Structures are given as C-alpha cells and as structure tokens.
Image (tube, rainbow, N blue to C red):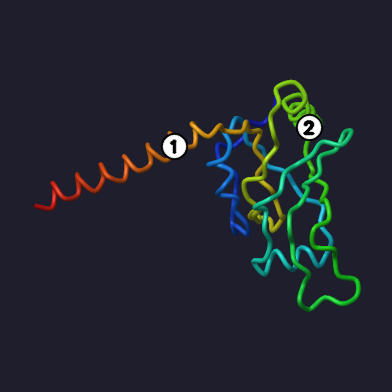
Amino acid sequence: MARPRPETFDKKKIVAENRRARFEFFIEDVFEAGIALQGTEVKALRGGEGSIAESYAEVKGNQIFLVNSNIPEYSHGNRENHEPKRPRKLLLHEREITKMHTAVERQGMTIVPLMVYFNSKGRAKVELAIAKGKKLHDKREVIKDRDWKRDAARIMKDRNGS
C-alpha cells in the first residue's frame, strides 16, 4: 500500500518564491521535486540567492528540466563555478512525470515552479504546479475580489472599533 502524501510539504527555509504564478495561473495540482544541483549552486541557495520569477518546467523525453531559473554564481567559488541560468534536472517519480507530460500535451497546461526551499533533511526542493493560464478578465475578477475583501475587513474593523 502506498504511503499517504502529506497535505503540505516540509519547508524549513524558503529560498525563492514565485508569487506572481498564483496570480497568472489557475493552480490545478502541486508536486514536490528534488533538483540536481552542483556544489556551488547549493551554497548560493543556502546564502538565500536565487530566483524563479521567469522560470518554467519543460518535459524532455522521460525527464523534466527547470528552465530559466537563476541561481547567481557563488561569491567564494573559483573557476569551477556554475552557469547561472543553466537548465536543471528535476527529480520526480516516473508516474508524476507521465502525469505532468499528459497534462501539458493533451490539456494545454503549463508546469510552473511555485517555490524553492530546503526541507528538514537539508535537501533543496522545488514545489511545482500543473497550471492553466488565466485570461485578462479572470485576473480583473481576482483583483476585484481582493479589493472587496480588504474593504470589507476595513469596514468591520471600523464598526467594531467605534
């Protein structure tokens, strides 16, 4: 029998977060993936550097790669330092890869990284989401709802305070 998956993943130190992704996409399903990194990349991430703002994941054959993520060169690295924007292999189970591949191929979905973090064992992980892009009117609706909730909270605070 398969072990049940946790509701949320074990996140000890969040390095980079893609907050724009939740605004730009409808999040369907979320996965946790390991990243194949070089030594200086891990050191740069532990220093809190790294960005996934413009990145996405791409299926190539039986593997998934994180494309366009930026991990700047390690400041104390030597000539063996890593390339900042190289594609990085993501480590997932085969059934997760096939699920993502079918979602991208058949349903026109996108694989978007939501955050990069270290778990309690000290391993670098990426939270990936299968997502569908929002149209302009969907984004406007989200902004309208957010503004209304903020105004309602302000009204309730004023009403309770006086």
Percent across and percent down for residue 1 are: 70, 24
Secondary structure under tag 2 reads: helix
Secondary structure under tag 1 reads: helix
* Quadrant of the rendered image containing residue 147: top left
Q: On the picture, is 137 further left or further right than 29?
A: left
Label 1 sits on what residue type? Answer: Val
Q: On the picture, is 41 further left or further right than 78?
A: left
Percent across and percent down for residue 92 are: 78, 39
Q: Residues within 10 Å of mark 1 (few under 14, many from 20)?
A: few
Q: Residues within 10 Å of mark 2 (few under 14, many from 20)?
A: some
Percent across and percent down for residue 12 are: 59, 56
Residue 58's disc number: none
Q: Report which residue position mark 2 lands on.
A: 97
Label 2 sits on what residue type? Answer: Ile
Point out the residue furthest to the left here: 162
Point out the residue furthest to the front here: 136
Residue pictured at 32% horizontal, 41% vertical? 149
* Quadrant of the rendered image containing residue 148: top left
Give the total of numbered labels. Answer: 2
Residue pictured at 74% horizontal, 30% vertical? 100
Q: Report which residue position mark 1 lands on.
A: 142
Query: Can you say whether 49 is above or below 143 in the image?
Result: below
Callout 1–callout 2 Cβ contact below 8 Å = no
**Disc number lying in front (1 or 2):** 1
Percent across and percent down for residue 24 are: 57, 40
Q: Label 1 vs label 2: CA separation?
A: 31 Å
